[in-house]
């Protein structure tokens, strides 16, 4: 039996779980007060604060750290990496602490895991980092030579959903062609073929989501940005926090939107169905990346619980392939099961280099 600690820091919380093999023993999301986080100038400075939260979690649940077989953290914003597991090493720690691609709370996971694993003399890992990049060459470029496409997606949950779907089909993941859509606060999609995520629709080049704008025509966006009405930071917040359903309807809660629709709110219905329509269009877009040879379309993420939304999507894409719905973020399970496959010898962890 393997006992695995999983750590997933978010902007205002730290999700922590302990599993014994596939069985969750304890899963908790620790919320951090704004006043607590305001004391730190950089996200990296939160390291000790977040590590102490993990240690208190273990103590509260009477988990002896010496019983742990491995520790896994959410993969942070590194330079492009492959999918699967990476051993956390000093090179990765230095990169995330001192030269991250972007400051993001997920960067702390590997730092905490590494520090604890050194004390316990066990291995620490990241799994399916946000920065997984397996794009085929013709998917990497844009019409602007100075700007290439960047692969930043909800890789952890999408790949886990793809692996579950392959198992349900009785096939190896590498033998499946899948289009997977992660439906959350941000919406991103991936095309899977040959055991890789060969193309993506990122959360800023596809459907709008509960809080993000998605794809916007460049010429219109440029006029908006150059109006002088917003600073750079205000514009970024507007596009990635105050757009989508939030911009149109004033809420990011899909359940509230559905209640409005049930009560006859036509605008709510129009915008919710528009989001479903755009998701379906992006699924069609990625089916082209697979030459139309799609074994399954997979809908996952928190909003995949919405039967109203998924029904609209299924109606538009069912001609492409059958649709599998695997709702929920499933982050802690995905992290744990990934490292469990490594410990069992079913996968091999990679060594991080720059």
Image: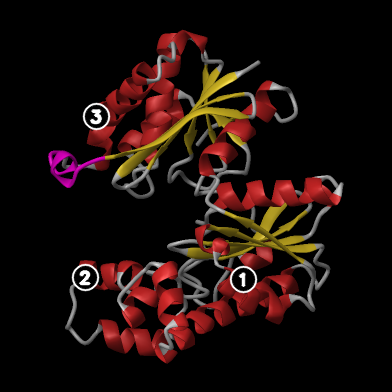
Q: Is residue 332 above or below residue 272?
A: above
Please report whichever mark, 3 or 1, sits nearer to the chain's N-terminal start. Answer: 3
Mark 1, residue position: 310
Give coordinates of residue 280: x percent, y percent.
63, 77
Look at the image and tell me whether residue 276 can be seen.
yes
Write down the quadrant of residue 324 in the picture.
bottom right
Identify the magenta region.
32-39
Judged by depth in the image, the label closer to the viewer, 2 or 3, is: 3
Please report whichever mark, 2 or 3, sits nearer to the chain's N-terminal start. Answer: 3
Q: Which mark is residue 234?
A: 2
Write down the quadrant of residue 85 in the picture.
top right
Q: Left or right: 227 with respect to 333?
A: left
Q: Gap in Å between the C-alphas at discs 3 and 1?
A: 40 Å
Look at the image and tell me whether residue 133 can be seen.
no
Q: Left or right: 290 with respect to 84?
A: right
* Image quadrant occupied by the N terminus: top right
Judged by depth in the image, the label closer to the viewer, 3 or 1, is: 1
Q: Left or right: 78 with respect to 321?
A: left
Q: Secondary structure at mark 3?
A: helix
Residue 330 in magenta stretch: no
Contact between labelled residues 1 and 3, with CB atoms less than 8 Å apart:
no
Residue at image point 42% right, 84% down: 263
């Amino acid at each position: 039996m393997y006992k695995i600690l999983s750590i997933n820091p978010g902007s205002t919380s730290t999700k922590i779980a302990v599993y014994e093999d596939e069985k969750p023993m304890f899963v908790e999301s620790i919320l951090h007060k704004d006043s607590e986080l305001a004391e730190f100038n950089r996200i990296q400075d939160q390291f000790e604060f977040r590590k102490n939260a993990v240690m208190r979690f273990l103590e509260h649940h009477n988990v002896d750290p010496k019983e742990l077989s491995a520790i896994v953290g959410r993969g942070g914003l590194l330079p492009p990496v492959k999918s699967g597991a990476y051993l956390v090493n000093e090179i990765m720690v230095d990169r995330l602490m001192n030269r991250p691609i972007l400051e993001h709370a997920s960067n702390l996971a590997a730092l905490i895991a590494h520090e604890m694993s050194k004390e316990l003399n066990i291995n620490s890992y990241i799994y399916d980092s946000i920065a997984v990049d397996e794009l085929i060459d013709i998917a990497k470029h844009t019409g602007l030579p100075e700007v290439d496409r960047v692969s930043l997606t909800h890789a952890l949950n999408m790949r886990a959903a793809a692996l579950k779907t392959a198992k349900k089909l009785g096939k190896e993941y590498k033998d499946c062609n899948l289009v997977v859509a992660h439906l959350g606060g941000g919406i991103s999609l991936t095309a899977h073929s040959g055991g890789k995520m060969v193309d993506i629709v990122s959360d800023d080049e596809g459907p709008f989501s509960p809080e993000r704008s998605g794809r916007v025509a460049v010429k219109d966006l440029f006029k908006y940005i150059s109006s002088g009405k917003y600073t750079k930071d205000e514009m970024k917040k507007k596009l990635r926090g105050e757009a989508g359903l939030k911009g149109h309807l004033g809420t990011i809660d899909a359940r509230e939107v559905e209640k409005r629709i049930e009560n006859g709110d036509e605008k709510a219905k129009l915008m919710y169905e528009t989001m479903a329509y755009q998701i379906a269009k992006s699924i069609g877009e990625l089916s082209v990346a697979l030459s139309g040879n799609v074994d399954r379309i997979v809908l996952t993420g928190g909003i995949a619980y919405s039967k109203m939304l998924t029904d609209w999507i299924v109606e538009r894409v069912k001609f492409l392939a059958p649709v599998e719905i695997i709702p929920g973020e499933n982050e802690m399970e995905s992290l744990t099961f990934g490292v469990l496959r490594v410990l069992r010898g079913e996968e091999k962890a990679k060594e991080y280099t720059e």
